[in-house]
Image (cartoon, helix red, strand yellow):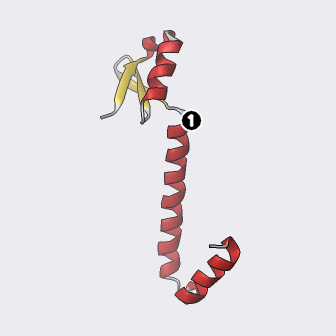
Amino acid sequence: MPRIIPINALKNTATISKFVEESNEPVFITKNGYGSMVIMSIEVYEREIAKNQVINLINDSLKDKNNQSAKVDATLFINDMKAKYGK
């Protein structure tokens, strides 16, 4: 469930900072009853950025899947990745 607080609650910065740090999701700020902004901890921000990057990689992969010239043998690909990243 999203956490929503009014903008006037931002006056108490120590409490809001603790609230945001303890929250595992973005906190929505309202102004006059309408959404105004979003604040989040660095950990939540980094997680959301990582999710976005994964989504972009998946979408790029799906596009490449339909491109005949981009197809690569799976065994060759895995061996190349093992050689490149050592796993």
| Observer-nearest of 57 and 17 | 17
Q: Residue at x 52, y 61 (%)?
A: 56
Residue 51, position as x, y percentages in the image? 49, 53
Outermost residue, left side: 1
Q: Position of residue 63 (x, y in %)?
A: 50, 74
Quadrant of the image occupied by residue 85: bottom right
Residue at (34% x, 33% y) in the render = 2
Compared with residue 68, is residue 55 higher up or lower down, i.e. above or below?
A: above
Q: Tell me if residue 4 comes above or below residue 87 in the rendering.
A: above
Badge 1 crowding class, 10 Å Cα cut-off, few under 14, some 14 to 19, many 20 or more, is few
Is 54 or 84 nearer to us in this picture? 84
- The number of numbered discs placed on residues in the rendered structure image is 1
Q: Which residue is mark 1?
A: 42
In the orientation shown, which residue stands out farthest toward the front?
87
Q: Quadrant of the C terminus?
A: bottom right
Element type where label 1 sits in the image: helix
Q: Indicate whether 80 appears above or below 86.
A: below
Image coordinates of residue 33 in percent, x first then y, are 34, 20
What's under tag 1, amino acid-wise? Answer: Ile
Q: Residue at x 48, y 20 (%)?
A: 18
- Look at the image and tell me in which quarter the N terminus lies: top left
The answer to whether 59 appears left or right of 3 in the picture is: right
Q: In this orientation, which residue lies closer to the viewer: 22 or 52?
A: 22
Could you tell me which residue is drawn at 48 percent across and 82 percent down? 66
